[in-house]
Image (cartoon, rainbow, N blue to C red):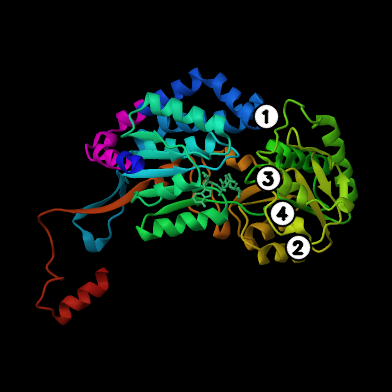
Amino acid sequence: MEFNHIFQSQKDFFNTHQTKDVAFRKRTLKKLKTILKENEGRFYEAIYKDFRKDRFDTFLTELSLIYNEIDFFLKNLQKLSKPKKVKTPLSLLPGKSHIYYDPLGVTLVIGAWNYPYSLTLIPLISSIAAGNTCVVKPSELPENTMHLLSELINTNFPSDYIYVAEGGIPETTELLTLRYDKIFFTGSPKVGKIVYEAAAKNLVPVVLELGGKSPALVTRTADLEVAAKRLVWGKFLNSGQTCIAPDYLLAEESVKPELLRLMKEKLDEINYSDGAGHYASIINKRNFDRVLGLVDKSSIYYGGRSNEQTLYIEPTILDNVSWDDAVMQEEIFGPVFPVIGFSNYDEILQKIIEGEKPLAAYLFTKDNTEKKKLLDFVSFGGGCINDSLMHITSDYLPFGGIGNSGIGSYHGEYGFLAFSHQKSVVEKTPWGEPDWKYPPYSDKKLKWIKRVM
Ligand code: NAD
């Protein structure tokens, strides 16, 4: 009932047209940035309480991206929201054509728990920038961050414009019955289907940012030192609880032993021990048990230790894994890195193609043909050549999945477009129209139409 009330009030507020004003949107974004800056310490504290996430990581992987997104829109919103003049075909002359970027209305953002600030606030920023009102439902699992978000947003902004709804499955289920103008969901493919189904009942368009098993490939031509360093960082950041983390590693047999040795060296250098400030815990006991359940002890090459009290799982590398092992059947979403060797690059690409389309893919190579084959033949959301994760940090690249890993994209301009309707308008002059489209028809008119259209 409360959600229905908020929803109706947001609809009414949207219809006052205040959000159409670009200056109003920019003021909102500036205010949001000030609130975040003034409360940065509380953001670090809340997330540390939730899963021991370190302040450096929180700044690097959450706050810096959020500030970036706000700054992007403060700089570019005027230009982005201006009607765009496009070409007008001969058949529509005399006249002109424009695309108008219309706000959609009332939007709903549902976030996942693993990056609880950026996965809620970046879509919110895009929604505000595009001129919508927004209800945000963060994940209930990191409860301190959820409370902080609702406190800061709900005390600083009117609920008929922006509102944070707290809650888990029952509350989300209730929210999903309302007829939003867009639903932006981040989470698992399983829940993505529930959201999509609920949205379909009201023909609500969606963006679904989902997950899956993202491969990393290392071939014999790669700089192994670089590959080891960047893969270890990308895999074990946030204890592997990253949607675009390399889920599993495919290493060319001839370089696999050296790559594994280098990865071990990097892990030893960094100190990922229990309680090491920079290494997050697993979010809850359920996920702790699930991730450990995927580890076949006989395959452990590195790591394997854990602590139930602190929900710590040591970075763990599994060697000589087979495609049929449990660890290869689901998204790992934890600090366990299975390694499979290969000797034929084309065959291994084919194996990836046979699975669900991944959210990300990473290739470490110096060979342009290998690079071209991956890019030409494998469908995946986004990724990097010779790096991991970093494509997500660019405002100039759309971020999103494909197939089982998602629908639609956001970040920068793409977030603006995700929350806008592109309204196409032809504007004709009241004069100068040839009469070829009006009856009575004639052969002469038909000839003319064939030429013009
Ligand atoms: P989840 O799907 O369990 O939950 C996501 C959201 O949905 C939460 O807000 C939760 O409250 C809500 N929810 C859960 N069950 C629901 C139900 N039955 N009905 C309605 N709402 C429900 O996902 P999670 O555990 O929070 O996050 C992990 C998953 O999210 C992984 O698959 C990961 O890859 C994916 N993910 C994707 C991205 C991306 O940008 N593509 C980012 C982060 C996480």
Residue at 86% x, 39% y: name it: 264
Say above or below: 17 vs 421.
Answer: above
Three-letter code, disc 1: Arg
Q: Verify whether residue 10 appears in magenta.
A: yes
**Disc 1: residue Cβ within 8 A of ligand 1's nearest atom:** no
Q: State left or right for residue 238 relative to residue 19.
A: right
The reply to whether callout 2 and callout 4 are in contact (CB within 8 Å) is no
Specify which label sits upstream in the sequence, 1 or 2.
Answer: 1
Position in image of residue 216 (x %, y %): 73, 51
Mark 3 burial class by Cα count in 10 Å: few <14, some 14-19, many 20+: some
Q: Is residue 308 above or below residue 331?
A: above
Q: Which residues are magenta?
A: 7-27
Does residue 289 appear in this view? Answer: yes
In the figure, is residue 399 to the left or right of 235?
Answer: left
Residue type at tag 4:
Asn
Identify the residue under disc 3. 287
Query: Magenta: predominant secondary structure element?
Result: helix
Distance (Cα) linking label 1 and label 2: 37 Å
Q: Secondary structure at mark 3?
A: helix
Three-letter amino acid code of the residue under disc 3: Asn
Q: Neighbour class for label 2 at 10 Å: few (<14), some, many (≥20)?
A: some
Nearer the observer, 32 or 350: 32
Closest to the observer, 238 or 344: 238
